[in-house]
Image (cartoon, helix red, strand yellow):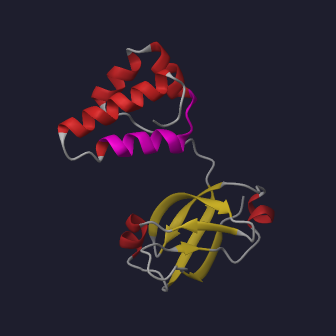
């Protein structure tokens, strides 16, 4: 697939701290996909991996706080983007203690292997984001329970 290079103004919604970009080309035609399209590239030379989402009137990509900080930009700024289809496997590394717990529980392990990249990432992000040990333990217990019951989230 071809690499796309373009400049685009980051979109914003007044009063909210978020930004998004809308590529100036037909994503389905260029990348050959209509729904969620995994992409990688750079924004102002800052590397990213993300997804374009079909919003009905075209695809858009959220430019999260980490990406904005790395690209030194904010909503309303015009940024230089290099983007291509991301066909590399997306994996989530479990923290060692959590990996041991999942591996030792056959039901949880089976469910974990079937989760999408995004759901795995969100589980790990929630657990790693806990500030107190008891909060982390509570989130791990909730995740394991959800996995045992074959639910994505609690």
Question: Which residue: 55% across, 80% down?
Answer: 11
| Residue 45 on image: x %, y % | 45, 72
Residue 126 seen = yes
Does the segment drawn in magenta span residue 117? yes
The C terminus: image quadrant: top left
Say which of 148 and 82 sits in front: 148
State which region is magenta: 114-127
| Residue 131 on image: x %, y % | 21, 47
Say which of 82 and 27 sits in front: 27
Question: Which residue: 58% across, 66% down?
Answer: 61
Say which of 126 and 62 sits in front: 126
Furthest toward the front, the residue is: 154
Question: Which residue: 75% across, 71% down?
Answer: 57
Does the segment drawn in magenta span residue 71? no
Residue 3 located left or right of residue 16 = right
Furthest toward the right, the residue is: 29
| Residue 130 on image: x %, y % | 26, 45
The N terminus: image quadrant: bottom right
From this view, report whether residue 118 is shown above or below residue 63: above
Decide whether the magenta segment is chiefly helix, strand or loop: helix
Residue 112 located left or right of residue 129 = right
Question: Which residue: 44% across, 39% down?
Answer: 92
Residue 91 seen = no
From this view, report whether residue 139 is shown above or below residue 70: above
Instruction: Tell me where residue 53 sits by quadrant.
Output: bottom right
């Amino acid at each position: 697939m071809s690499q796309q290079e373009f400049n685009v103004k980051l979109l914003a919604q007044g009063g909210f701290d978020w930004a998004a970009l809308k590529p100036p080309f037909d994503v389905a035609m260029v990348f050959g996909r209509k729904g969620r399209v995994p992409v990688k590239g750079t924004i102002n030379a800052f590397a990213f991996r993300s997804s374009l989402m079909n919003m009905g009137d075209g695809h858009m990509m959220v430019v999260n706080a980490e990406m904005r900080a790395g690209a030194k930009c904010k909503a309303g700024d015009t940024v230089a983007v290099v983007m291509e289809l991301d066909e590399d496997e997306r994996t989530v590394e479990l923290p060692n203690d959590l990996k041991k717990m999942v591996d030792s529980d056959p039901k949880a392990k089976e469910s974990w292997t079937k989760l999408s990249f995004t759901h795995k990432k969100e589980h790990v992000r929630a657990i790693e984001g806990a500030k107190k040990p008891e909060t982390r333990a509570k989130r791990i217990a909730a995740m394991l329970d959800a996995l045992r019951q074959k639910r994505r989230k609690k």
